[in-house]
Image (tube, rainbow, N blue to C red):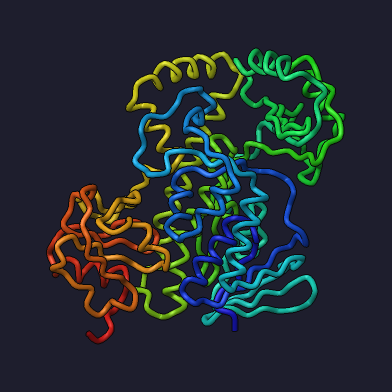
Amino acid sequence: MIDVTIAGAGPTGLMLASELRLHGVDVTVIERDAEPTKIVRALGMHARSLEVLKQRGMLKPFIDAGVTHPVGGFFAGIPKQAPELDTTLPYVLGLRQPVIDSLLADHAAAAGARIERGTELVDLAQDATGVTVRLADGRELRSRYLVGCDGGRSTVRKLVGIDFPGEAARVETLIGEMALDVSADELMRVMTQVRKTQIRFGAMPLGDGYYRVIVPAAGVTEDRAWTPTLDDVKAQLIATAGTDFGAHSPRWLSRFGDATRQAERYRDGRVLLAGDAAHIHPPMGGQGLNLGVQDAMNLGWKLAAAVKGWAPTDLLDTYEAERHPVGAAVLDNTRAQMHLASLDPGAQAVRRLLTELIDIDEVNKLLTNKITALDLRYDFGSGDDLVGRRLRDIALSAGSLYGHMHTGRGILLDQKGELSVGGYADRVDHVVDVSPELDAPAVLIRPDGHVVWAGSDEVALDAALRRWFGDATSR
């Protein structure tokens, strides 16, 4: 029996596979498509996702392959640079999704995950001990748990009967990579004028005369399998910008809508959902890929604990309890951003007002933190301001915090050396070190980087260890 089967080899599924392998969990990833997609849905990663990669020692190849950009202009495309952020990675990493997928796949495979491409899940059945998955080629896979990371049209979600309420698409946008016969000056002149009101339009240079082009579609198609043609794109460029820029030789063409939906629940017995299978929303602010990677970070160690048998009774349920509200908040901010992208006079008036308000640093920081997820705080029922939050990569007298997090274990960071992890040494590392950046004598940090306890009371520490790491072994 496999420990965990993951349906979907996108960023969420691949990140989850890597997390599970840190704990020795046997993982098989199945992916319907025989080859990785060439379609570029996402263009980069925000600060919190970069922190997640750094916590696992995975960041360097991503940095080497990408380009760093200042944070700003992400909320509804309003051009305002972000204020100082609480992170050692205060930038956006420009990196096309196929490259992100490839790097995550390489890491997961190197960690021991099996990745089967061209393998389509067509049915499943679960019982008290596991999940049986039937594949299109007639094979069956049996695993203790199944995680659906298979996108917005998730087969897994549909088969277990989890509702996906929300709003259908009201507008669609065409997207693709193609050559343009236009000078840089002329393109910039047109873009500057059109984007004063229409932010769902643009052309980003890729080199060799090719551009990533986005333009509003003429309407919403009923056929979800429909792919636009070059003529469709050229017609919409003329309708929007008055010219088609001599577009030709497309590498790929696609479309996306503003449908906004969230799974009613993220778990059905031994079946869980993550990434786009759990939530879809417009790409405003570039949050989708990041949200999925962070779902995987939250779920990975909890699912591993359940497989290994040391998880507290309700630990796996905290995945939905914590991540469902986060997904709902992203859906809300993308709804707001889509409204601000409308050409309706009322929406444009609100956009002008918000543009003025973003000049206030507190407003700018609030909106930037929503996009980057740096303000995320889980409700652990504590009044301590640190508890529930993630810590940035604080400096220690020897190295830094994230350098201790590569193994995916919990950490007791103890500045005085007066505490103990006792019977949890097999799950929690005791790091005795000091940091001028930490305003607490000690903190207990979960494997996903969130603080679950702060203080100096050993009794309270023991309760937090038991709450998040189960029963102690003999001391």
- Give the camera-side residue of 219 and 5: 5
The N terminus - image quarter: bottom right
Q: Outermost residue, front direction?
A: 398
Position of residue 51 in the picture relative to residue 131 (left or right): left
Mark yes or no: residue 263 visible: no
Q: Is residue 257 above or below residue 377?
A: above
At x 51% / y 41%, what residue is drawn? 331
Residue 334 place in picture, x, y as percent: 52, 35
At x 53% / y 42%, what residue is drawn? 93
Position of residue 394 in the picture relative to residue 357 (left or right): left
Mark yes or no: residue 259 visible: yes
Q: Is residue 289 above or below residue 120?
A: above
Residue 473 place in picture, x, y as percent: 28, 84
Position of residue 165 in the picture relative to residue 84 (left or right): right
Residue 53 place in picture, x, y as percent: 48, 55
Mark count: 0
At x 46% / y 70%, what residue is drawn? 303
